[in-house]
Amino acid sequence: MMSPERPDIPAPQEDGAAASPRGLDLVRLRAYLDAERPGLVAGPLTGRLIEGGRSNLTYAVTDGTAHWVVRRPPLGHVLATAHDMAREHRVISALRDTPVPVPGTVLLCEDSEVLGAPFYVMEFVEGVPYRTSQELAALGEERTREAVLGLVDTLVDLHAVDPAAVGLDDFGRPEGFLERQLRRWGKQLDASRNRELPGIDELHTALGKALPVSGPATVVHGDFRLDNALIGPDDRIRAVLDWEMSTLGDPLTDLGLLVMYSTPLQLPGSPIGTTASAPGHPSPAELVARYAERSGRDTSAVSWYTAFAWFKLAVILEGIHYRWTLGQTVGAGFDRIGELVPVFIEHGLTTLQEG
């Protein structure tokens, strides 16, 4: 929250000013941090956009000595509830003292007058987010296998957290979670619908007709994959990032998404990479088996959750494509996002029909 004693924040800089990346006014950020955390910043700030994110914008910021990360919603078109900075800040703060590795949080600002949107600042964590098979292959087969299996173990740790014990017992409404998820992503699709997408309504309907029965609810990440984790030089998970979709719900939605991202995709020239083709990468079946063994959960309906993951990602990518058509998305490769949506729809239909 803003301090009533804080000095006036300087007027916004022009977009494209040399000192500030688009969407992050470093002069105004410095003034806000000086008011809210006196002594935190030791000098003028510099910053850069961290490429690779497909939704919220992430910036690395430094005063020349210390390093932080700033997260804010995308510029322009924002779908309801999809970019809630307060929720993301809350869940990371709550998980800090659990076995789940997360960055430390510095502050949350819900005043849009400072940077044009709510944002939060967190500690910088050293590590590598492996986004493609080529990047992961550099580790070699054995290290690749251990890193990916470590991701599964981290997911088990997350789903073992007692929400009430960390103050997250009111973080979501587990009852009817899957039905609400289907409705929510259907609405998200409608909010970004500006072209024909053959098969996507068929997939949405088929998922609704085959809803599984959810087990006990847990904290779910909502976008759990290897490139949302930072891997240290010891191949261990140093931090799980991008909690914007987290809530209380069915833990197998996280597993289904991980399985989806562990399915090799032939997408030459695509801005969306997967690591599934890297030598040593465990198969989807291995990941499911390890999760089942370590969590004790029934994973027999994992194909439904995987098909749902294909649908959800199709909707997310269509939203990014929509923002790109409006000139409201920052980052390289967004001009090709729209080509991927039919691929995800097809995989979702095939997974649901064939299991």
Image: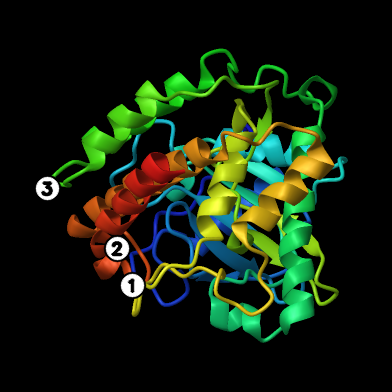
For mark 1, what is the residue? 333
Q: Nearer the viewer, mark 3 or mark 1?
A: 3
Residue 161: x and y in percent read 81, 32
Write down the quadrant of residue 3 in the picture. top right
Q: In the figure, is residue 325 to the left or right of 277?
A: left
Provide the secondary structure element on which disc 2 rests. Answer: helix
Name the quarter where the N terminus is drawn.
top right
> Total marks drawn?
3
Q: Characterize the local packing of mark 3: few (<14), some (14-19) or many (20 or more) Cα atoms within 10 angstroms.
A: few
Residue 229: x and y in percent read 67, 60
Answer yes or no: do the residues labelled 2 and 1 have beta carbons within 8 Å?
Answer: yes
Q: Which mark is residue 195?
A: 3
Q: Earlier in the sequence, mark 2 or mark 3?
A: 3
Q: Nearer the viewer, residue 171 or 114?
A: 171
Q: Earlier in the sequence, mark 3 or mark 1?
A: 3
Q: CA distance from mark 2 to mark 1?
A: 7 Å
Q: Nearer the viewer, residue 145 or 230?
A: 145
Q: Residue at x 39, y 65 (%)?
A: 22
